[in-house]
Image (tube, coloured by chain):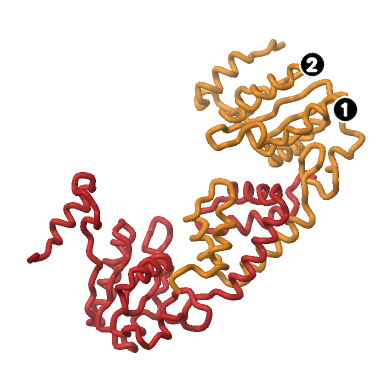
Chain colours: A orange, B red
């Protein structure tokens, strides 16, 4: 036996297709799985089956869904004229937890990162303009992260959506609540100064 | 839906148990798997099932095996008095490809790395002394890597095996075949000088 058993090689090859995973790590994990109690692989198989069976993405906003459309897109109480664009489902969930947003979402499943090969075609943008037109959206809120990739994505979207005539806004950057100026980074502080609003 | 679906969370939790994987990467991969064609998850389930069904580790040397003992441990033509200790199965396979070693192996499935929590108890050392005694091993060849962890492991094993009275040797370090001195690192070059042998 001077070659890897096909099953081991297959597991490693499949794991190496996950984003950011190299063949070496993948092979190490295949060995690790083999060395674990069999319950580990069994649970993983089971969880994968359930994942593919019970969870999918909403055909409209690309949020997690158990049907064709997610509960938010189906909810008639949500304002269809407000559309908040987020990078990922965890961001959407964070916004939902605040309870302060009653519009709909559009989940990109990523942010522009040319060096990682993520361009507009890799984001779920195909039906964005169509949604804006069909749902009578009046404001698109760009809620991508305040890091380089999130900012680049926001700039790209603002430019792309300009021809639609929709109002495009960006969530505020500034000092976080409870944040002490002394410990904030310069960049956040500059943004907070530049973005100051009338008070009192 | 302001929490993650249980199946998604479960896949992420299981993936995060792989060595060196954090919860954030694991969650990203769970989303990635969900976004792939269903054939990906299906193939991975199938490969995991086959891996656990058809591949295991030899109860003697911890090499890959399809039965209780691997083909090398079962082969009566292999010299039982020579035992070569390697860090992993890929190392064993590399040595086998050379065809120049006819003894048996002992696969550690790792190297000592205290900072990563890998001590002697995490390596497959439990039956090492027993094998040396029972198989009448006369020489143990330490074929761990020439990096910090491999060297530390070799030093540990040499010390641990001293009471058994077995001859312990270490594979040679020096300039690789085809290696040009000019481009070699100082450390390899020093080792090659220190390890010089009589010639001609």
Lateral position of residue A91 relative to residue B187, left or right:
right
Give the SS element for disc 2.
loop
Residue pictured at 56% horizontal, 23% vertical: A188
- Image quadrant holding the N terminus of chain B, namely top right
* Residue occupying the far right of the picture: A76
Residue at mark 2 to residue at mark 1: CA–CA distance: 14 Å
Residue pictured at 19% horizontal, 44% vertical: B182
Give the SS element for disc 1.
helix
Q: Is residue B144 above or below residue A145?
A: below
Q: Is residue B119 above or below residue A130?
A: below
Front residue of A188/A179: it is A188
Residue B89 point in image, percent of width and height: 43, 68
Residue contact between numbered discs 2 and 1, judged by CB atoms under 8 Å:
no
Residue pictured at 36% horizontal, 84% vertical: B131
Check disc 1 and report the residue beneath it. Answer: A134
Check disc 2 and report the residue beneath it. Answer: A165
Lateral position of residue A157 relative to residue A103, left or right:
left
Mark 2 nearby-residue class (10 Å; few <14, some 14–19, many ≥20): few
Lateral position of residue A104 relative to residue A109, left or right:
right
- Image quadrant holding the C terminus of chain B, namely bottom left
Front residue of A134/A51: it is A134
Residue A32 point in image, percent of width and height: 52, 65
Whether residue B117 is visible, yes or no, is yes
Name the quadrant containing residue B2. top right
Residue B91 point in image, percent of width and height: 38, 66
* Host chain of mark 2: A
């Amino acid at each position: 036996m001077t070659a890897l058993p096909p099953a081991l090689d297959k597991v490693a090859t499949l794991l190496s297709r996950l984003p950011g995973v190299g063949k070496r790590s993948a092979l190490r994990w295949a060995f690790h799985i083999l060395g674990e109690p069999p319950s580990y692989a069994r649970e993983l198989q089971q969880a994968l089956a359930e994942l593919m069976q019970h969870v999918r993405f909403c055909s409209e906003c690309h949020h997690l869904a158990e049907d064709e459309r997610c509960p938010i897109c189906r909810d008639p109480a949500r304002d269809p004229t407000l559309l908040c664009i987020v990078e990922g489902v965890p961001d959407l969930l964070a916004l939902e937890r605040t309870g302060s947003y009653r519009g709909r979402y559009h989940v990109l499943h990523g942010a522009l990162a040319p060096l990682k090969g993520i361009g507009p075609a890799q984001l779920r943008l195909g039906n964005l303009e169509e949604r804006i037109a069909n749902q009578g959206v009046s404001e698109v809120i760009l809620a991508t992260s305040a890091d380089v990739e999130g900012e680049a994505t926001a700039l790209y979207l603002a430019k792309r959506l300009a021809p639609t005539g929709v109002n495009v806004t960006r969530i505020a950057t500034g000092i976080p609540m409870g944040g002490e100026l002394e410990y904030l980074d310069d960049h956040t502080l500059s943004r907070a100064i530049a973005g100051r609003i009338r008070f009192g």
